[in-house]
Image: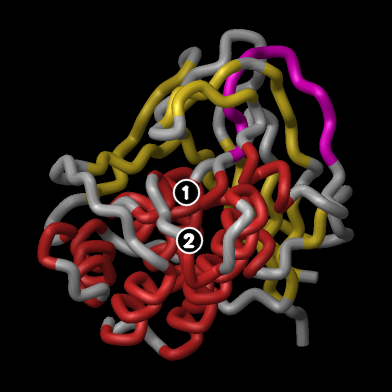
Amino acid sequence: MKQQAIVLRTPSGISGDMLLTGLARLANVSNAELSAIVDSIGVEALHDCVTIEPHHVNWITGWQARITLPHEHHHRTPAVIYDIIDRSALSDPAKALARRAFAILAEAEATVHGCTVDEVHFHEVGALDSILDTCVAASLFTRIDPAEFHCSPLPMCDGVIRCEHGLLASPPPAVQEMLSGIPVYGADGMGETVTPTALAFLKAAGARFGKWPQCEVVTSARAYGGKVFEHLPNGANFFLVTL
């Protein structure tokens, strides 16, 4: 029997909302089904906050997550986020994947800040959008349940990123910590191409970085994020394949 796998190509990088978008298209969920997954997280502020809509960049059609969330200043610890995940109505495999992703993030942040994992206070990655992206992506990924997950080497750009810690060099420190052992290449452009939330998810989901596997494509989806790079092919390309 043929096995199902996911192949991801990231010519302009990858973010949490792009993961959510691409996996939603591969899983063939409607916006109503997506809303039900979001509600299963059990965070009231996330209710009815996201839809997946057609989007164009340079006249190429793809999909984009339209996310509307309240502005907040919460700095959540890993324990608080684990509690949100554990109390949710997500499936057990989705909970386990979401916890692994945040655990990888917590280890990276602890190294960056010279503290223990328990002392980490997530800023951007503890915000509602990161909880949304990680939990929904985990639900969709485990619903597809691929035997393998293949991802291209990741593009890296120089530049400056503005965040709560001030101005940081690209890639940001948490991404630097998580890049060990992952193939990367320099891309034309400036700024953040790979977000901490996305990279932690790729690692937690067991992504294999490199060339395409020998496979047969079943379906594909192009996911756009909120940033457009002038000198790069934009969007992340998701493929559901059989091996």
Q: Quadrant of residue 56?
A: top left
Image location of residue 104, percent across then percent down: 61, 65
Residue drawn at 47 percent across, 34 percent down: 224
Give 53 or 46, whichever is nearer the viewer. Answer: 46
Looking at the rendering, the stretch of residues picked out in magenta corresponds to 184-194
Give 1 or 136, whichever is nearer the viewer. Answer: 136
Give 228 or 127, whichever is nearer the viewer. Answer: 127
Residue drawn at 28 percent across, 60 percent down: 30
Q: Nearer the viewer, mark 1 or mark 2?
A: 2
Residue drawn at 76 percent across, 20 percent down: 187
For label 1, the crowd category at 10 Å Cα-Cα, with few meaning under 14, some 14 to 19 and many 20 or more, is many
- Using the numbered discs, state the Cα–Cα distance from disc 1 to disc 2 in whole angstroms: 20 Å
Please name the predominant secondary structure of the magenta segment in the image.
strand
Q: Secondary structure at mark 1?
A: helix
Q: Residue 16 got which mark? A: 1
Name which residue type carries label 2: Val
Question: In this orientation, does residue 218 appear?
Answer: no
Name which residue type carries label 1: Gly
Image location of residue 133, percent across then percent down: 39, 56
Q: Quadrant of residue 77?
A: bottom left
Residue drawn at 76 percent across, 59 percent down: 150
Position of residue 1 in the picture relative to residue 119 (left or right): right
Image location of residue 235, percent across then percent down: 55, 32
For the N terminus, the quadrant is bottom right
Sequence-earlier tag: 1 or 2: 1
Which residue matches tag 2?
120
Q: Is residue 115 magenta?
A: no
Q: Secondary structure at mark 2?
A: loop
150 lies above or below 39? above
Q: Is residue 193 magenta?
A: yes
Position of residue 182 in the picture relative to residue 237 (left or right): right
Q: How is the image coloured?
A: secondary structure
